[in-house]
Each structure stands twice: as C-alpha cells, then as structure tokens.
Amino acid sequence: MNEERVGLSLTQIARRIQSQEVSATHALEDVLEHVAHADDTINAFVTVLRDQALQEATAADHMLRAGHLLGPLHGVPVAIKDILTTDGITTTAGSKILADWKPDFDATVVRKLRQAGAVIIGKTNLHEFAFGVTTENPHHGNTRNPWNPDHVPGGSSGGSGAAAAMGMGYMAIGSDTGGSIRIPATLCGVTGIKPTYGRVSRYGCLPLSWSLDHVGPLARTAEDCARALQVLAGHDPLDPTSSNRPVPDYLATLNDPIEGLTIGIPGEPFWDPIDPEVDAAVRAGIEVLKSQGARVIDIEFPLADEIVAMQTSILFADAAAYHHRWMRERPHDYDSRVLAGLQQGATVPAVDYVNAMRLRSVLREKMNDVWRRVDLLALPTSPVTAPRIGHAYETVAVGNGELQLTRALTRNMGPFNLLGTPAMSVPCGFSSDVLPIGLQIAGPAFDEATVLRAGHAYQQQTDWHTWRPPADTTP
Amino acid sequence: MERPVPSHEELKAQLAMLGVNIDDDALPGLQRRVAFYQEAMNRLDDMDFGLIEPAVVYDPDAASGGA
C-alpha cells in the first residue's frame, strides 16, 4: 500500500489519475489494501465491492489511455452510505429488516458519481435506518472512531465519516436529517457539507423524514466537497423535491477572498453548555476567518428555544409513518433504541406536527431577516467531542452545565435541517485526548458557494484537515 | 396549561390505536422520552401564529428560504 497516496485528498488523487501519474487501478488497490488492514477494527463498511471496483478501475484506465475522460471523478474510489440504493447490490440501511434487499436501480447520486467516472468501493455502515447519531449498530457491528476506536464516529453516516478520515475512499456520501453528515464529519475530523434542501436529489435514499432529509459528501477538504457537490447537484425529475435552480460553478469562486463577508455568531443555546476545549478551538477558528477580513458580529438566532420541539415533532412522526408497517409486523427486528424512537414518533399528535410545520414557516421568515444582515453563520458543529462507545446516551457534566450526549451532538444541527439551508463542518482542532473538533459554517439557501469558499479560505490558513488518524487502529 | 405526561396505559392505548404493540418493559423508557417531548412542546403551545398566515409548503425553493 502506498501510504502517501492514501493520504491524498480527492482533488489531489483526481489530478494524479487524470494526468496518468497514477492509474485508477493502483489508486483503488491502495484503498482496498487499507480497508483490508484497518476495517476489521473500524468497521466502516457493510459491503466492500472489491471485484466490481477493480473491474471499474481497470475500465477507467483503459478509457483514459484511449483519451476518453468520463468526468471530474474519473477513476476516483468513493464510498456510499448504505441507505442509498445501488443496482444489484445489497442496500441494508444498516438494518436487519433490509439485510438482503437488492434494489434494481441506482440512487440518482450513485448514477451521477458513476457518470463522473467514480469507482464505487463499497457501502458504508450507519445507525440503523439513519435514526440515531452514534453508528452503534447491533446488526452490522459498531463503527469505531478512527482517532480512538473506543469512541463512536458519530452518525448516522458514521461509516462514511470513518472511511473519509481513514482514506478508505477519497470521498463518502452521507445523508443528513438532523446532523448525520456534519456530526460524523466533526467527530472523525473531516469536512462534510449538508447542501440546501432540493439541491441534491434524494431519489433512491431511504427516507427518515421527508422534509428534513438531505444528501451530501464527506471528504478531506472544502475543495473536495466543492468538487463532489458539482457532480451531485442539480435537478432530478425523479425527486419531486428537487430544485430547478441552475447549479453554479463552485470551484470558480472557491479561491475568492472572504474579505468583506459578514459572519454572524449565534448566541444561546449554541455555546452553552460546551466543552471548554471545543469552545476555545471554535473561537480560534472564527478568529482565523476574521484575520482574513471577514467582519464578525453577534446575532440572535430566532426561535432557538423552539428548535427541539419543531424538529422532534416532524422528524419522529415522519419516521414513525415510514416505519409503521414494520413497527407492527417486525418490531423485534429493530435495535431497541431505534424502536423506542419510532414508538415515540407514533405518539406525536397530528396537531403538534402541523403546528411544528407552521412554526417552521415563521422560523424561515425570521431567518431571512438574519440573512439580510449576514452572509454566513459560524458556530460549533458539536459542543462535545466523540463519546465513548456504550456511553453516548449518558448525561455528563459539560462546561458549566450538563448534557445528554446524543442530544448534545444534535443540538447545533437541527436549525439548518428545519431551514433547509446549507451547513458545513470543517476540522478546527483537537481535544487534549486527540479527538477532533469541528467549526460549522452555514449560509443562506442555495449559497453553498459562499459556505465552501469560507471553508476553503479557512483551510488555506490552517492544517487541521491534513491531520490523519493513527495507523494503528487497535482498540 | 402544562402538558401532562401520559401514563403507561395511556401510551399503550395510543400505540394500539395504530396497531402497534409495545413490550411492558419498554414503557418506562417511552414515558421518559414523551415527558421530554411534552416539556419541549409546552413552548409551542404558547405560540401565537396570528389569524392569517402563509400555508405550510413543501416546495423546495420556498422550503429552503425562498427566492
């Protein structure tokens, strides 16, 4: 295995493959060897598509030698969260219920990745049906955090976060209903963006909550995410919630300066309670943006205290509706905590659901007032670092208060799912016990370009995104 | 008026209306979850939405912030 190559970013490996400095086959073999070495411990993958991927990489090399470039991801090994359908390949959603389901179609994002030349190396593990944030999974095994295998990688896209951090694929697709891209991104020390609702097709992604679900990439850098999003974004007639808006050229503006941008720092409850080391790292990250000429102002986030009520009503009731049949027919095939959440969702009164949706409209209007004053928001992705496996549901002392850890992980996420606006996590430091910390950058609807630009500007001044987990992953 | 926390029997009956069974030993956990939810929802019960308001929409552009 070529250690140096495995540590490259998507942008770097794509360039090397396109220039034929390295073949797609060699790039893939490095990744597969890395998976064989490390995934017994990390368990990022439910399915590894070794033979199929090798065939695809060989074909990619033949095409390139013949002068035919499929697209910007030609020959690049990538991983897919196992909640997105893949033609003829098991799609488990991390469950026992769908353990043997082989759909006969690709999700739109999978189809787009293939068209762009990507080589799909496998399907990544997740919290069962994406309904949880730890990726502790009794059916397919727990995914472990690459920085410390005794800790969770976050979730629900925990396998994708761990794979991206380990270099087991140069980009991994995740889905985000209440933080499921950004939580594993911050806990695993990678960059992940939840795009605007409607920006990336969800066709072929099993739903958790129809109006909160988003699909997006996790990778090493903001530039990688921009490159991936360029491929993934765009209207899809198969997804009725897909937007018709034209997709801008994200890479064209990536290097524009952030001087003159106004960045809002939302106050309560995003910063309190918070682990003091997280607080210090995120505030230092904001200073880096400021040092590049961004103007930083404090803002009050509208309806911040009502977010949990809105999010819980909508997300849990939607999940219960989707799972209603299996809840009746196969309740004991669910993880007990997942089943408990679904049962809770089944008790949400219809009036609560509608009122949550009404208030969501009010939130959107009030937030539009905020977006008239600021270009971006910056805040902690999570107020805590990765909890230990088996302890994520405990309530612990954090800073000046107490937090139930899974609620802590989702606390700063929900607003951007309710709003449907883009939000990205970039690595901004490490705790004293060497667990990653993330800075969340959020922007107005369909302005992924500015979010990515700020993340890229930050990563030009810092090196947190270049840190790699220890090679020895023995727990 | 503060929302009450439903009893085990009330929760069981509510789920049964949807044809969903729950094991007795899962009821305390569900009750704790619902208690947390009820407390959060108390805040929404006091909301004044006004007499006229826009409809709840699923249009992606409107849903994600409007044009």
Image (cartoon, rainbow, N blue to C red):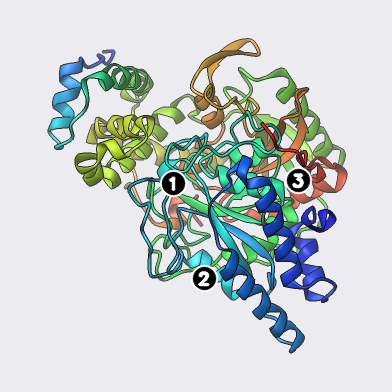
Q: Which residue is mark 2?
A: A111
Q: Is residue A415 left or right of residue A354?
A: right
* Residue type at the position of mark 2: Arg
Viewer can see residue A128: yes
Q: CA distance from mark 1 to mark 3?
A: 41 Å
Of A187 and A281, which appears nearest the observer? A187
Q: CA distance from mark 2 to mark 3?
A: 36 Å
Q: CA distance from mark 1 to mark 2?
A: 21 Å
Q: Which residue is mark 3?
A: A261
Q: Is residue A298 left or right of residue A354?
A: right
* Residue type at the position of mark 3: Leu
* Residue type at the position of mark 1: Gly
Mark with earlier residue (1, 3): 1
Q: Is residue A86 above or below residue A258?
A: below
Pointer 1 with pointer 3, Cβ within 8 A: no
Indicate which disc residue A94 carries: 1
